[in-house]
Structure formats: structure tokens, C-alpha cells
Amino acid sequence: MVRTLKTGFKMKRLFHISWASLLLIVVSVFIWLRPMSVNALNYLIWKYSMAAPAETGNIVYQGAHIHYVSYGHGEPVLLLHGGLSNKLSWFSQIPWLVASGRRVVLIDTRGHGDSTPGHSKLSYRIFADDTLLVLDRLGIQRTDIVGERRRHYCALAGPRSAAMAAALFGRIGGFIAAFYPDGYYPADFRLLAGDF
């Protein structure tokens, strides 16, 4: 009987030590990744407690289902994610932009996130066409754009003329978290010149 009690006590102690160790690991990771984990937690709290539901949908173009989501009301801002990413790369900015009175539009570009690749060869032109179709579906006639890495080029590749671009886009901003210390490559300048 005493031996059974000792074994039961050891198992209970081992159980508590295991849970305490697991909790310590989770808290350590949370602290280590604090900026990202706090922002992710803020985003989840915001997403599941916001009063207005998100507007989501898909467009079908050249064999691809392009997924988009729109939050909030007001002057629109289109956030374009970088390669090998998806719309959730903007999770830290979404609540802040919506709280500041902006309509935030996010697109999973072709072959990323919830969007399928379709049967067309991937190019900035096809990304731009997808982007313009999403804006049409949402009834957006003019928007500001922020693109991660080279995705803001998607917007620039779409309009067939400078006048059309000026009518459709407000402020266009891009940032590159590049692996290249000298910034843009010559190919980037060809993109800006319209050689898509």
C-alpha cells in the first residue's frame, strides 16, 4: 500500500513538473518573440471582437481563385504582401489602420495563401490584373497602396496608362526587406519604367 502511494505521488509530481516546464517554455517563447506575439494576440482579440464583419470573397480569373478580405470603412488602403507570404503578414497593421478610419483591403496573390495559382504564367502583369479585378469587385475607384517587397509593382503594372494610374491610385508606398545591402537591382528600375 505504501509503495502504491509513493508511485502515485511520484506520478503526480512528474505531471506537475511537466506542466510547469511546458508553461515555462511557452512563456519564454512568448517573451522571446514578444513584439510579434503581442501583435498576434492583439490582432486575434481585435478580429474576434470587432463589431463589423469582414467582407471576404474570391474572384476567378485565368483559372485562379483569388482570395481577398476587406475590413472597416473609409478611405481604402490596399496592402499587398511579399512573395512566399500571404495577407496575414499585415496582421500588426490591420487593427491600427481600421481604428484610424481606413478600409483595409488584403489580397492573397495568385498561388499564395488562400489563392490558387491558376494556369497562367506568374508575372507582375497577371498580379496587377488580379488586383484590379478585386478592386472592381469591391467597388473601389481609388485607393492608396502599400506593398511589401516588390508587390507594389503589381499596382503599377496594371493600369495601361499614366492617366489611368493617377485616377486609380492615391499614394503608393513600398518597402523592401531585401537581402541585398545595396537595395534595388537594375531589374527593379526596368519594372518602374514599364518593362513588365
Image (cartoon, helix red, strand yellow):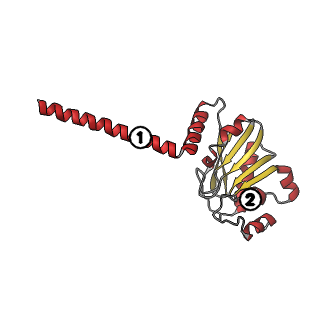
Which residue shows up at 73% across the image and 61% down it?
Answer: 125
Point out the frontmost of discs 1 and 2.
1
Q: Is residue 165 above or below residue 143?
A: below
Could you tell me the amino acid type at mark 1? Leu
Residue 172 location (% of width, % of height): 78, 52
Q: Give the mark count.
A: 2
* SS for dot 1: helix
Tell me the number on the disc at residue 153: 2
Residue 86 location (% of width, % of height): 61, 51
Residue 174 location (% of width, % of height): 73, 55
**Which quadrant would the C terminus be assigned to in this image?**
bottom right
Mark 1, residue position: 24
Compare marks 1 and 2 and give the one earlier in the sequence.
Answer: 1
Dot 2, how many residues are within 10 Å of its Cα: few (below 14), some (14-19), or many (20+)? many
Which residue shows up at 66% across the image and 41% down it?
Answer: 94
Q: Is residue 115 above or below residue 17?
A: below
* SS for dot 2: helix
Q: Quadrant of residue 177?
A: bottom right
Residue 71 appears anywhere in the view = no
Q: Considering depth in this image, is 194 or 133 the residue closer to the camera?
A: 194
Q: Quadrant of residue 7?
A: top left
Could you tell me the amino acid type at mark 2? Tyr
Q: Quadrant of residue 18?
A: top left
**Which quadrant would the N terminus be assigned to in this image?**
top left
Residue 65 appears anywhere in the view = yes
Farthest left residue in view:
1
Q: Considering depth in this image, is 113 or 12 the residue closer to the camera?
A: 12
Which residue shows up at 36% across the image and 37% down it?
Answer: 20
